[in-house]
Amino acid sequence: MLPSLLLSAIAMTPAAEPADTAKADEAIHKYLSAKTKELSERFMDGAKTKAEWEAKRPKLKEQFLDMLGLWPLPEKTPLKAAVTGKLDRGNVTIENVHFQSKPGLYVTGNLYRPKTNDKKLPAILYVCGHSGKGRDGNKTAFQDHGMWFASNGYVCLVVDTLQLGEVAGKHHGTYNLNRFWWQNRGYTPAGVECWNGIRAIDYLISRPDVDAERIGVTGISGGGATTVWIAAADDRVKVAVPVSGMSDLESYVTNKVINGHCDCMFFVNTYQWEWTTSLALFAPKPLMFANSDNDPIFPMDGNRRIIARLRHCYDLLGKKDLVEEYVSKGGHDYRPDLRLAIFGFFNKHLKNDTGPIKDADFAKIEGKDLRVFPEDKDLPKDQINDRVDELFVPAVDVKLPEKKEDFAAWKVGLVKKLRETSFRALPDPIPAAKPLMEGEKKRWEWSTTEDGIQVTVDAIPIRKTGNPNGLALMLVLNSEDDLDKGFLRDWAKPLLDDSALIALPRGGLQWTRKSPPNYAERSHALLGRTVDDGSVRDVAAFVRMMNSLVANEAMAPKGKLGWKLVGRGQAGIINGYAAIFEPSIKELVILNPPTSHRDGPYFLNIDRVIDLPTALGLLAPDVKLTLINAKDKAFDKTAAIYKLAGAEGKFERK
């Protein structure tokens, strides 16, 4: 039963106020802005000297690839490159080419090269922004760049993106498709675009007319972001010019610029980096950071912060003359001055040529002539582009230990990996919540679990015959639930055997949930966290606070309080993870549990560490677990783990 301190509180707990969306929006924005400020101080992982940076860089490179879903690096399978057509345009030949960066992951592009040439040339990989050209692919929108480079002594490969290419996939999973399971998988289309770029460089250097020691990469908007990813990931890139393609966390989150961007603009910030650190990985090679002064999705305040960090980085590495900034006057677009600055930078650093240049001047080519697959019937039947999000980052297959004596070490290893990979944002240990003070009175029903976040608590005065296990009872709701809705009590009462607390993690904050842009949920991932891992913290922190408040009561034997938590759906699983981190949670009842994390709750990279039935199995042997409406065979694995731990009597399915 509930200790007397909790029982007395039931009568005084006020009814919850209706959700106030405007207040919730303000609260979550303030919270996210504070977290952004913390990360913004971590440029170059805090390296203060060249030696410190060089020592940190190899590990940071692995982390960066991991945050793109590319670590360990995928196997470089045969490209199976093919040319499907050629065009002659004056002194330039254009080849319509495709290759497979992974089996079935098709990359379509146009390769521009001088018509006559007898030596190895520098090569440019041009990665495209979000220009909708339909069936022709967005590569056709940037043909002027291919023509200029080929006319001036380069080989230039312009490649389609996944979202707007000839063989189309999706960039907008969490932006407007509600595919928040991407966060579980650690998947981002930025990883696909980066990998496609790495394999495009493989293709370029396989050609007899390309000098592998003179490779550059550039692009605007989404192509600017992809330029950053490729330059940071692939050491073969010697010169990079990202154009209007990257801002910083203060811009994206605090100033809500994330609302104007799709998912390909972001890696999954598992390791909670300051964003510019990704470009620091390219230093000290020649870099031009190019932007426009009136670009609403890459505003100048963010640009100024980034270039200041980069200049500090290059100066630290003794190469301050190799980083440049160019700012064009105007909006989010190319203009002649911007193109000439880009072309001149590549000429200087790839050809040692600082002479005068002219902008591209040529007759526009019809998009259909640049198609790699001329007709719909020509599109590859074995393509996986339209479902690459399911396949690109593999889900883990957790193997159970064979012997009971191996169980404890197996469990410790998995919990450690969960901490490192999916719950990195949670303090270890999770600190107790703090009751709000009214004078000298502690009001635990209005407690804060971290700055700006509260747990909202009410009570259900059932008072049956009493909880035979003597555990404090708490019903945890899902964030969209309302404490005042009677039906919640109706479905909950059959599961409760005593008076209970009823709690809303994250204070039940009902912020604006508009798809697009899903501001709050997507911003959390940019800060290395999710809404749901915050809820896990709330449950564990509240329990720890109550443990300390009742530690000296007679109802808490030996100064310890045990808990039984009840929840349905995602809330039940959140309780499960809270129990992994909080040993005073001794019993769980979960109604209608999801069979996989795909149906929530959402935790960064969780599918790369553990599946949901195995996670529930980690509660063995200490936590009694009852699953209701859980006949799915997926939970056979949970039962097997409990049996392996010698605790099969503590697991029940109904």
Image (cartoon, helix red, strand yellow):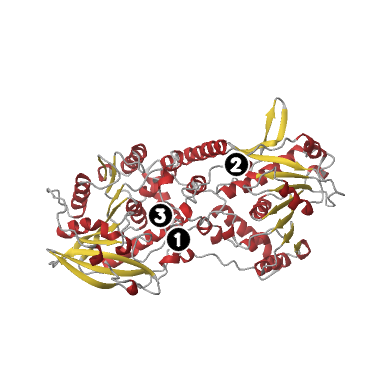
Q: Determine whether, in the image, residue 46 is placed left or right of residue 592.
A: left
Q: Earlier in the sequence, mark 1 or mark 2?
A: 1
Q: Secondary structure at mark 3?
A: helix
CB within 8 Å, label 1 to label 2: no
Crowding near pointer 3: few (<14 within 10 Å), some, many (20+)?
Answer: many
**Front-most of 266 and 518?**
518
Horizontal and vertical percent for residue 159? 30, 62
Residue situated furthest front in the rendering: 486
Task: Looking at the image, tell me whether mark 1 or mark 3 is earlier in sequence order.
Answer: 1
Residue depth check, mark 2 versus mark 3: number of the one nearer the observer: 2
| Label 2 vs 3, first from the N-terminus | 3
Residue where numbered disc 2 is placed: 509
How far separated are the C-alphas under marks 1 and 3? 18 Å
Label 2 is placed on what type of residue? Answer: Leu
Which residue lies under the disc numbered 3? Answer: 264
Taking depth in this image into account, of 217 and 428 the one nearest to the observer is 217
Q: In which quarter of the view is residue 276 placed?
A: top left
Q: Is residue 63 visible?
A: yes
As measured in the structure, the alpha-carbon distance from the residue carrying label 1 to the one carrying label 2 is 35 Å
Which element is circle 2 on?
Answer: loop
Left or right, residue 260 beside residue 644: left
Q: Which mark is residue 303?
A: none
SS label for mark 1: loop
Residue pointed to by mark 1? 71
* Res. 102 visible in picture: no
Q: Percent x, y for residue 102? A: 39, 69
Amino acid under disc 1: Trp
